[in-house]
Image: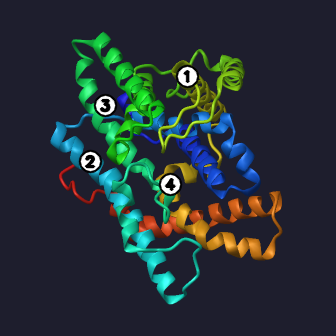
Amino acid sequence: MEEQLGRRIDFIDLTKGLCIMLVVMMHVGGAFDGLADGPVLSSFTMPLYFFVSGLFFKSYEGFAGFLLRKVDKLLVPFLVFYLGSFLLMYGISKLLPGTFRLPVRWSELLLVFRGHELIRFNPPIWFLVALFNCNMLFYIVHYLREKHLPAMFAATLLIGGAGFWLGRERIELPFYIDVAMTALPFYFAGFWIRRYNFFLFPHHRFDKLIPLFILLAVVTMYFTATPLGMRTNDYPGNLFQVYLAAFAGIFAVMLLCKEVKRVPVVTYLGRYSIITLGVHGPLLFFLRPVVSRFLAGGWVQSVALLALTLAVCLLLTPVIVRLMPQFVAQKDLLNRNQ
């Protein structure tokens, strides 16, 4: 299993690619608002990212090494996208006043310290902070695995339930810690799947039943899904309903991608999904007025904006990977001793 995880797995990249495309679509809005605000897509999209991240959890040589790697792979890209997008928009707003509808002020840099306020100059990157905290939580919990496995399950469920309760009570913790708590069961499930080969091995005796499993998962999700606001830790449904729908959606997408295996463009987006995550928010500020100038509203405008945004992300990805791989989790910046 470790050898299998050490190689790139096309259908995992395909899963991440499909997921990041759904995230961009939700942020495009417009005609997509009905889908983005509806219960089905929102019920599993962000939980799927936490799940996939859990697949590749490693404790490394100890907490110091683990912390260094997660700072390298999550917080460094967050800071690059956070500061880079702000400075870009701030500079343009000074050179061309009125370019952006929202004011660009230095106080905006403090948004990440104030509860779950929207990072207006780059909304999607909240996820990197929440995922970092989820990694920290799971690192603590996973120590129970060897001698106290039931306690590991119990601790995960307890932390997840506590995060859900904080959301229902509208109690916000800084740096999305409460979001990380609610997401911990998804991360744990990804880690646990590693112990078996149902998802990761290319050929499994259950593969022939994949269409049936997908159908069951979709039906389950359809009848249980409620809108999830993970950034705000806002969940209208009850705890059982939220987790059941999310896991049904996760398994439906994962199994579908395992069946398809590879779609080159989507797989490429998935392999470097952190870049699309970090750049598509600012891109939309620039591309939206361009598209709206030439196309009327409705589906044509929204589809064109989605396609153009993804195309620009595809063009920028190899450039960014080549010029600054240490800042987008492709090479080590802080850890030089691997």
Residue at the (27%, 18%) spot, across then down:
145
Residue type marked 4: Pro
* Comparing labels 2 and 4, the label whose residue is closer to the camera: 4
Please name which of the two marks, 2 or 3, marks the residue nearer to the observer. 3
Residue 207, given in percent of the width and then of the height, sits at 62, 20
- Please tell me the numbered disc located at residue 161: none
Local secondary structure at mark 2: helix
The residue singled out by tag 3 in the image is: 138
Q: Which residue is mark 4?
A: 124
Tell me the mark number nearer the camera, choosing from 3 and 4: 4
Residue 35 screen position, x and y as percent: 72, 43
Question: Is label 2 in contact with label 3 (beta carbons under 8 Å)?
Answer: no
Residue 300 visible at all = yes
N-terminal-most mark, 2 or 1: 2
Tell me the amino acid under the disc marked 3. Answer: Phe
Please state which of the two labelled residues, at mark 1 or mark 3, is closer to the viewer.
1
Above or below: residue 227 compared with residue 21: above
Residue 166 vs residue 261, the one in the foreground = 166
Which SS class for mark 1? loop
Q: Please identify the quadrant where the N terminus is shown.
A: top left
Reading the image, the residue beneath label 2 is 69
Instruction: Count how many numbered circles sit on residues in the image.
Output: 4
- Give coordinates of residue 209: x percent, y percent: 67, 17
How far apart are the two marked residues, 3 and 4, measured between alpha carbons? Answer: 23 Å
- Write down the residue under mark 1: 238
Amino acid type for the residue under numbered disc 2? Arg
- Name which residue type carries label 1: Asn
Q: At x 28% / y 37%, what residue is drawn?
A: 136
Note whether residue 187 is visible.
no
Separation of residues labelled 1 and 3 (CA atoms): 24 Å
